[in-house]
Image: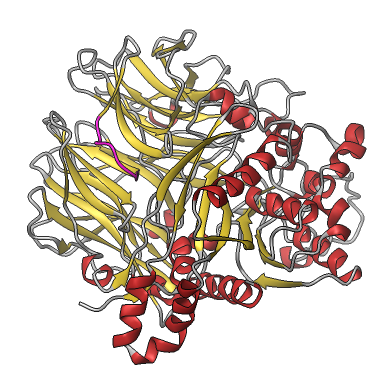
Amino acid sequence: MNKSPITPEDLYHYRWISQPVISASGQVAYVEQTIDQAKNEYSTQIRGISLDGTEDVALTHGMHDSSPAWSPDGSRLTFLRSTQGGKGLWSLDPEGSEPVMLISPERKISSYIWSPDGKYIAFTSKVHLVQVQPRDDENPKDENAEPAVQLSSALRGSVYERTTPKAEGAGWWDGQYSHLFVYEMISGHITQLTSGLWNITTPVWSPDSQKLAFISKQVQEEEADPDLLHHTDVFMITVEAGEEAAPYKITDSSLQITQFSFTPDGKQLILIASDRKYGSGSHHQLFTIPVQRGVPRLVAPDLDMQIGNAALGDMKSAAASPSPIISRSFPKQGFYVLGTCQGSVDVYRIQPDGSCETITPPGEKDVYQYTIAADEKTLVAAVLTDTHPGELYTVEMGSGTMTRLTRRNDEFMAKRIVNPPVRIEFPSSDGWLIQGWLAVPDLAEMESTAAVNSDEAASVNRRGEIGLKKKLPLILQIHGGPHAMYTGAFSHEMQTLLAEGYAVLWVNPRGSMGYGQEFARACRGDFAGGDYRDLMEAVDHVLSSYEILDEFRLGAAGGSYGGVMTNWIAAHSNRFKAAVTQRCISNWLSMYGTSDIGISYVEGVIGGNPAEHAAYLWSRSPLAHAHNIETPLLIMHGEEDYRTPIAQAEELYTTLKRYGKTTKLIRYPGSNHSLLKSGKPSLRVDCFEQVIAWFNHYL
C-alpha cells in the first residue's frame, strides 16, 4: 500500500481514545473523541469493547458524551452529556436501551462517583456564593433619598479582592465555588452536603458507603491568603447526616494533595501529594494517613520518581487517570500508580514497604490512563507508542504481556508514513545525564511515494533534493513547564515537521521531571543557565554524532517555558537560522502581575519579585536582549491565554519591529494556553501550517 507523509490537515482524521472503565463482568467502556470538521469542534461518544477485542461498538450517540462509569454491579453505565444548558448525568443499559437522564444539565456537573453499595451517586457542581460586582450597602442609606437605580451587571464594573482573580482555562473568577451533592438512586432526591467560601474536588466514597472524603483548601486564619498558600487537605463528611453534616479535616495542611484513595478496610488513606519543598519542581510522592487523623507518613522515601503523568504531548484528549488504585488484597499486593521516569510513563505497583515494580512492559510509551479488572489479572491502559496514536491495550498482570485492544486509528495510520525517533543520551558539561530523541525522515519512503503519487511529486521532490544533498536541516523542539517531560511517543506536531524533510530533536533538559528530584529542581533560580547549556549541548551532540545533519541549517521552536527558552536562544546565539516561539514569556517583570501563576512562578522558578529583584528579573528577560536578535522569529499566541498573557508576545513583537528585526506575530482568537493540545481544530491546523511555512522559507 502506498503511504503519504503526515500533513497538518491529518489532525482531522485521528481518533483520540481515553477514559477506560471495566465492569464487574469484564466489559470495557471508553471515550472516543473525533473532530467534526464542518462544525470545527470536537465530538465525544462512549464505546464498548470486550476484553478479547471483539464487539467494539458505539454505546452512546450524543455529540459530547464523556466520563463513563459502571454501577458497582455492572448492570448500568452512567456518563456525562454536555448540552447548551450544561452537563447532566445519564444512564443506560449496555444491552441496547436508550439512555435515561438522571440529573439535569442545569446542575452543570463537574465530576461524579458511584457509592460502593450502588445506592448513591456523589457529584460536584458549582454554587454561586459571591457577587463579583459593587455592593449596594457599602454606604449608609438615607431613608428620604430617591430609590437607587438598579444597574444591569453588564453596565457595572466587576470588583475583585482576591490575590488571583483569574485562572487559565476558566477566565476571570465568577464568584462560584465547587461543592458536593449526593443523588439517591431510588428516589432521585438530591442533597447538597457542603457549602462555604471554598472549593471541593475529587470526592471519594468510603468502602462502607457511609462517608465521603474530598480535597479542599480551607483557611481559618483571617490574615491568611488562600491564593498564596499551596497546601490542600482531605476532609470527611458523613452522608446520612445530610444537610446537617459538617466536614472535618483529616490531614494537617502540610501537603498539596492531588489524589487519594481509601484502603479496602476503610482505615487509611493513600495520598499522592507534594511537600512543595521545591515549589512546582517538587516530586509528587506517596503518603498514608489514618482516617482518624494524624501526620502523613511517606510510603517510599527512597523512590526518587515523579508519581503521576508529567508527560507533554499533543495526542491526549483527557487528563491522567485518578490514582492510586488500591489492591483488594491490600496490604499484600499494595497499590498501583502512574509514574514518570526516564522519558516514559508506566504503571507501577508500590508495596507498603516502599518496594516498587513496573507493571507495563519496557518501551517508548506514554500511559496516560488505566484501569484494573476486578480480579486484578488484567490491566487496561490508554497508551501512546512511538509509532501510533493512543489506543487501549490489555496488560497481563502476571507476565506483563501487552496486547492491543482497540484499533480505531489503524485504517488511517496504515496510509501514513510515521518516522519513529531514536533515543539519545549524553553527559552535560557539568555531569548531568541528558536524554532526548532524534527523528529523521524516511527519504526513501517519501521518494517512492512521490514516484507513484504525481499530485504530491512537487512537494516530495523537494524533500528528495534534500536527501541528495546528504544533509538534513535540524529543528530543536523545547518543551514547556519546565517541570514536565517529553517522551518518545507519537506526536502529530513532530511528524508534520518530519514529513517536510526536517530532522527533529527533542530533549529533556535539567528542570524536567522523570530524572530524579535533584534534576527536576536544578533549573530553579538558574533560568537560562544550565537549562540553556543542556539544549545547546544537545544540538552539538547530535551534530557530532550524525553526519546527515546540517549544522548550517538549524531551527528552534518551543511553547510556554519552551517559548521563553526559544526567545533566550535567539537573543544569545546566531547559529539558528529560524525560530518559532509559541505561548511565550518575554518579560519576567510584567509576567509577575499578569499571569494567573505569576507570583509563584516568577518567585519560585526564576527567583525574585519586581519590588526586590527588578534588575535581576530584567536581566533574565529575553525582552532586555531582544535588540540583539538576528534570527527570524515567528511569534504565535492565543488571545485568551491567562498563563502567559498575550502581552508577552506583543512586547516582544513591538521591540523586534522597533529595531528592524525579521518577525511576524500571529494572534489566535478565543484561544488559551492549551491551543496546540485542545484548541479549535482549524486553529491547530493553522499553527502547524504557519510553522512549516516559516521554516520552509528560512531553512
**Magenta segment includes 411:** no
Describe residue 254's horizontal placement relative to residue 317 as left or right.
right
Residue 469 on image: x %, y %: 51, 72
Q: Which one is in front, 600 or 127? A: 600
Q: Which one is in front, 406 or 180? A: 406
User: Is residue 271 depicted above or below 203 in this figure?
Assistant: above
Quadrant of the rendered structure where residue 369 is?
top left
Quadrant of the rendered structure where residue 618 is?
top right
Number of labels in the image equals 0
User: Is residue 253 depicted above or below 6 in this figure?
Assistant: above
Q: Which one is in front, 691 or 107? A: 691
Q: Which one is in front, 595 or 621? A: 621
Query: Magenta part mainly helix, strand or loop?
Result: loop
Residue 65 on image: x %, y %: 32, 61
Describe residue 48's horizontal placement relative to residue 687 as left or right.
left
Describe residue 410's horizontal placement relative to residue 133 as left or right.
left
Q: Quadrant of the N terminus?
A: bottom left
Q: Residue at x 59, y 49 (%)?
A: 539
Residue 491 on image: x %, y %: 42, 58
Residue 71 on image: x %, y %: 19, 42
Describe residue 472's horizontal placement relative to residue 482 as left or right.
left
Question: Is residue 613 in view from this perspective?
Answer: yes
- Looking at the picture, the colour scheme in use is secondary structure
Q: Quadrant of the C terminus?
A: bottom right
**Magenta segment includes 360:** yes
Q: Residue at x 33, y 56 (%)?
A: 66
Quadrant of the rendered structure where residue 631 is?
bottom right
Q: Residue at x 13, y 43 (%)?
A: 74
Q: Residue at x 16, y 31 (%)?
A: 397
Q: Which residues are magenta?
A: 359-365
